[in-house]
Image (cartoon, helix red, strand yellow):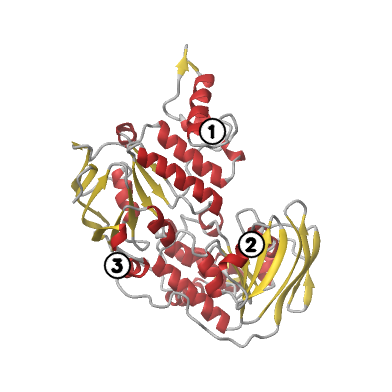
Amino acid sequence: MFQNNILTLNNISKSFSGIKVLEDVSLQIEKGKVHALMGENGAGKSTLMKILVGLLQADAGEILLEGEVISGLSVHAILGKGIAMIHQEILMVPDLSVAQNIFLGKESHRFSWLNASEINHKSKQILADLKLNISPKIKVKNLSIADRQMVEIAKAISNKAKVIIMDEPTSALSEIEVVILFGIIESLKNQGVAIIYISHKMDEIFKISDTITVLRDGKLITTKKAEELDNQSLINLMVGREISELFPVTKIEVGKTLISVKNLGRKNVFSDVNFEVKAGEVLGLAGLVGAGRSEIARAIAGLDKIDAGTITIDSEETQFKSPLDAIRLGIGFVTEDRKALGFIPQMTIKENFSLASLEEFSKMGFVNTKEEIKSTQIVYNNLKVKASGLSQKVINLSGGNQQKVVIGKVLMSNPKIIIFDEPTRGIDVGAKFEIYKLINTLKAKGLAIILISSEMPEILGLCDRILVLSRGKQMAILSKSEASQEKIMQYAIH
């Protein structure tokens, strides 16, 4: 199909425990182009990329880089051939410096000693070429998520990568940082580097992709030039059905105020935050990265202490000493960082579901397993979790289904107020639609919902009112009829 191929995957197949996750998938990647790999969670994207970089071995098929067969090589050998991957979960050693991370495994030595000055010098040059103002000597743990993402790109470039796989590279970036990243991608294309780009953000895909491949249920559906597709046709290819109305409209009669926040403050983080949320209402928190949205959510959920102000739940002023206090008072918190804070990967779906509500099933220190299974099965069915059953470990689920487990755990505690912090980050459009429907269902049941999202369509599509923050300050509260993307951004960059 393409004249300038650098990478070819022929008839790749892979099964786990007899279940086919990839079936005869073929790809051709062009030099100096961005090739988007699209599909719902569980479509086989991650498995295919893990095979490409040597983390998994295919059951059948072959991979050729510049005409040379590289199937079956180790991760280190694949990296040496010029294929690098920037993972969604950033894989770096936090206590090492930026330079040490960039040159990890390929350090310069002098008389058996690490040549720190050389790797610092080389790293400084790579970072400068990327127009990044990051010191090579700073420890990675002291960097923001966005800067860590940029260092991962610098690491790939240091490997003289011919093909770079980017898995959800903008999930933790602000709009300004996304612009910088896209500039870097353009520069890499001009140098002949091929980019395989995985993202669930449709606007990004059409902004930077030259070619789009769609996988569904482990099978190749199509490969097309980006200009041959639009938003709706791409969604239809991914999910195999038409999602005509992404944000379901539900008109709910709002009830009494369930949560009220007055003059809330945390030193050097946010101050003078005031809002209330009624039963059957969704309040959005909007703003750029660093505006204080998640920090406010953490304070309300009892994770962080406040220095000023009050939180009133159901007309009663409260003070939280721990997240358990918040849970007992009816506050559920769906964290933005599901992998680190939302679930325990090696535990089962059942165990994760009941984690925050074991008191309900316990008597004299013993868990009533029969009742636990009965209750968790109801939540499992209602959320339509795609798994082999309640006994499946959460680590083996797709991102969208892991997110359902996090939400299920919160629902098990019977909250009356739920905070959703980036509930659809890194999940596909089909799973997003299910979460949107769930939020509307919870709204219809009379819950008060606080929604944090970096995706403007979600904020505008789901929220009844929108509180806009800028650098820890409350700038405005807009009604649904007042709100627009332009108006929110005007307040957010104030």
- Residue 488 falls in image quadrant: bottom right
Q: Amino acid type of disc 1?
A: Val
Label 1 and label 2: CA atoms lie apart by: 35 Å
Q: Secondary structure at mark 3?
A: helix
Label 3 and label 2: CA atoms lie apart by: 36 Å
- Specify whether residue 327 is in view: yes
**Label 1 sits on residue:** 98
In the rendered image, which quarter contains the C terminus? bottom right
> Which residue is situated farthest in the bottom direction here?
253
Q: Which mark is residue 447?
A: none
Mark toward the viewer: 3 or 2: 2
> Looking at this view, is 472 or 303 the one in front?
472
Position in image of residue 411 (x %, y %): 55, 73
Mark 3 vs 2, N-terminal side: 3
> How many marks overall?
3
**Label 3 sits on residue:** 237
**Label 2 sits on residue:** 490
Position in image of residue 52 (x %, y %): 29, 44
* Image: 62 above or below 126: below
